[in-house]
Image: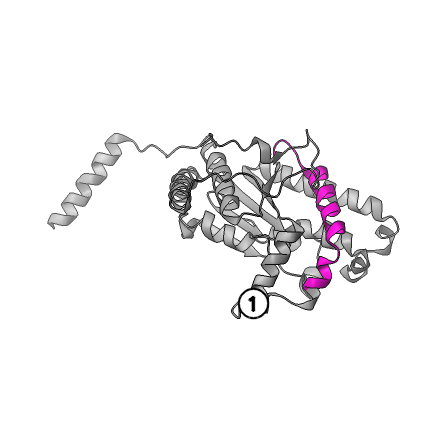
Amino acid sequence: MKKFSSKPFRFDGRTPYSAKHTPTRIDPLFRDEDDRAHQLDALSDRMDQAQNQMHAHEKYGFVVLFQAMDAGGKDSSIRHVFKGVNPSRFQVAAFKKPGKEDLAHDFMWRFWKKLPERGYIGIFNRTYYEEVLALKVHPDRLADNSIPEEFLKNPGKLWKERYADITHFEDYLHRNGFRVVKFYLHVSKEEQGQRLINRLKDTEKQWKLSENDLEERQEWDAYMQAYEDAINATATRNCPWYVIPSDDMNNQQLIIAHIMAELLESLPVHFPQRNEKEAQKLIKQIEKQDKA
């Protein structure tokens, strides 16, 4: 097997992203199911060890964003990739349509509230990018978002300014020690269709699909363009996008795990060193307590 490289999946603004020219499937990174499971376990251990150091160091944190079309594999990737990470230092926030309270604030407000602390990994299952994806595909919904009319007169300017707001927000997080990792799970329309059919055949998963979901699927091309626009407008060297070929979920999870392990291990962190004399003093105190 070739040594893993994240470069083919990384978009940092130097090379434009094109949905049509980016594969949704690549050759497997594993020989068989046993090999895949072994690799995933090893990567999970690496992530956990690196996260332990980050937590002890207390200066860095991770904000990991997952975006995808329905049935892209967000939930399964989060569940399998991060299965070995200490759950007490790991947070997941899932975002649905904004509620009344959310709409009474700025479009980033509800996401600000869920940011992780230093030393933690925070996962966003769907993100603030919905504000330049779903709303761009359905601009008529902007009228329900309490946005002043003066900003609705020029949609092109509105989207450009939102891209800038998001880029500044992510740059701000980076300069405060929080690494922003953005995953777009790139699945083909054909593969998505088969997954949706499989859901409808599974009584335990039928509830996940509604007619509204199928109506959204009719806007596939518009969504692909919206993703392309958003990725190209917000991909930077400090906060790049990783576009993951996702027609094969097993491969998808391995790619994400490789990238996360590499990024966590790249942090300049270390375990705090305790003074040896102080450590010996504490050991003697414990031994004295045990004899009492």
> Going 61% across and 33% down the picture, which residue do you hit?
238
In this view of the protein, can residue 116 be seen by the observer? no
User: On the image, numbered disc 1 is attached to which residue?
Assistant: 201
Residue 237 on the magenta segment: yes
Residue 270, placed above or below residue 85: above
Asked where in the image residue 14 lies, by quadrant, the reply is top right
Amino acid type of the residue that numbered disc 1 sits on in the rendered structure: Lys
Q: Which residues are magenta?
A: 213-238
Q: Picture coordinates of residue 271 (x, y %)?
A: 37, 35
In-front residue for pair 222/153: 222
The number of callouts visible is 1
> Going 84% across and 51% down the picture, which residue do you hit?
151
Per the image, label 1 sits on a secondary structure element best described as helix
Q: Picture coordinates of residue 117 (x, y %)?
A: 50, 47
Q: Where does the N terminus fall, quadrant-wise?
A: top left
Q: Picture coordinates of residue 212 (x, y %)?
A: 70, 65
In-front residue for pair 26/287: 26
